Image (cartoon, rainbow, N blue to C red):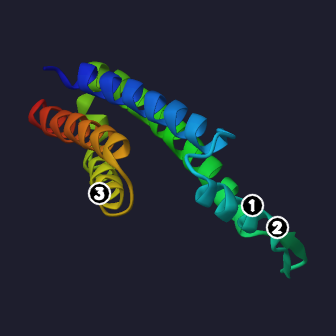
């Protein structure tokens, strides 16, 4: 498979990952009363930090939305690399391998801390990015 398509597939997977992640993050449905209690506690305890009133619930939500933004930015990068792979593969340089390393780190963290959905998405993305980096490097 050509690196152009591999980067485009990775782009689509990043978008799907971002959508599913955001839907799960913003869902008001709690899987159990215990989870609802933890979520309520995370939102109810406030403290001042560096001039701001914060909660663990706010930190959780903020970092979750930050991950959504990072996933969407990764989709943009993957799409741009797909264009470069088709027009000037030499221009990709080490960025393709750095992007693959990022995907491997994402896979490792998903494996350690999360569940099947993020693990599978991360593995598919890493496979596409690694294969595309290898193919783009071979095109030189």
Q: Which residue is mark 1?
A: 40
Q: Is residue 19 above or below residue 116?
A: above
Rendered image: mark on residue 111:
3
Q: SS of the residue at dot 2?
A: helix
Left or right of residue 95: residue 48: right
Q: Are marks 1 and 2 in contact (CB under 8 Å)?
A: yes
Q: Quadrant of the N terminus?
A: top left
Q: Quadrant of residue 134?
A: top left
Vertical relation: 3 (above or below) 52: above
- Residue highlighted by disc 2: 44
Residue 40, image quadrant:
bottom right
Q: Residues within 10 Å of mark 3 (few under 14, many from 20)?
A: some
* N-term-proximal mark, 2 vs 3: 2
**Between tags 3 and 1, which lies in front?**
1
Q: How far apart are the two marked residues, 3 and 1, measured between alpha carbons?
A: 27 Å
Specify the quadrant of the image occupied by residue 78: top left
Which of the two residues, 52 or 140, is positioned nearer the viewer here? 52
């Amino acid at each position: 498979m050509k690196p152009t398509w591999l980067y485009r597939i990775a782009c689509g997977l990043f978008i799907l990952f971002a959508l599913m992640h955001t839907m799960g993050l913003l869902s008001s449905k709690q899987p159990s009363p215990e989870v609802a209690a933890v979520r309520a506690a995370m939102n109810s305890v406030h403290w001042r930090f560096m001039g701001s009133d914060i909660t663990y619930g706010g930190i959780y939500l903020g970092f979750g939305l930050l991950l959504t933004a990072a996933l969407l930015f990764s989709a943009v990068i993957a799409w741009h690399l797909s264009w470069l792979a088709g027009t000037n593969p030499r221009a990709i340089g080490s960025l393709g391998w750095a992007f693959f390393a990022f995907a491997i780190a994402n896979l490792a963290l998903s494996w350690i801390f999360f569940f099947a959905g993020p693990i599978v998405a991360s593995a598919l993305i890493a496979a596409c990015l690694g294969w595309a980096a290898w193919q783009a490097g071979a095109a030189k």
